[in-house]
Amino acid sequence: MKLTLRLCQLALCLLLGSCGNVGVEHYAHERPALDLPAFFAGPVKAWGIFQKSSGEVVKRFEVDITSRRDGQRLILNERFRYSDGTRQQRIWTLTPDGPGRWRGRAADVVGEAVGEIAGNALRWRYDLNLEVDGSTWQVSFDDWMYLMDDDTLINRSSMRKFGVELGEVTLFFRREAAAHPGNS
């Protein structure tokens, strides 16, 4: 009886969790349209926070991002500086996978990240090996990025383990002056 009740509760939670999902195609007519290689064509600076599910901000960070092209692939080199003084580097290799679709790999990403773009929005989904208090947790990210103008991208990520939300990451990306064509 208890097992049946638990299974029903789990099914209800999964059903309710899937009801609110908006697909990336919902943003197909939003402008400006996001072009990943164009946005990351020059240096990009980002600022972010990690909040627990309670809303408490537990980490602040800055990221310097440089990129290069390797054929069709876009290589992003992210260098993180956290408020506690720690540093981290993540190098993404992003590959187009058909119209509006991207795939991504990085050393701490489990398997492949899958991305979809429509209009001004990008949705990335992936699992990441995350260092937490001396141990490694595999957590799932559901990233939503929105291009606000030609130089500003906002990212909001939900981080989950076993379907339970651990917290959210919020990032603001800004293309630096050198990224603007025609600036001297």
Image (cartoon, rainbow, N blue to C red):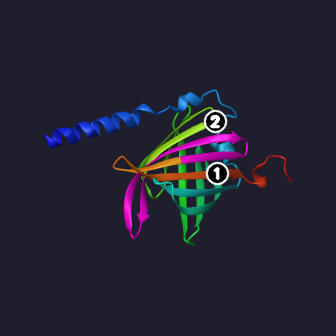
Main secondary-structure element of the magenta-colored stretch: strand
Give the CA distance from mark 2 to mark 1: 15 Å
- The circle drawn on residue 120 is 2
Q: Position of residue 136 (x, y in %)?
A: 38, 63
Q: Which residue occupies 40% across, 53% down?
A: 139
Q: Nearer the viewer, residue 42 or 1?
A: 1
Q: Amino acid at mark 1?
A: Phe
Q: Earlier in the sequence, mark 2 or mark 1?
A: 2
Q: Which residue occupies 37% across, 60% down?
A: 137
Name the quadrant containing residue 49. bottom right
As drawn, which residue projects farthest toward the left?
A: 1
Q: Which residue occupies 80% across, 46% down?
A: 181
Quarter holding the N terminus is: top left
Quarter holding the C terminus is: bottom right
Residue bearing the label numbered 1: 172
Q: Position of residue 138 (x, y in %)?
A: 38, 56
Q: Nearer the viewer, residue 162 or 94?
A: 162
In the displayed structure, would residue 99 be above or below residue 75?
A: above
Q: Which residues are magenta?
A: 128-156
Whether 145 is among the magenta residues is yes
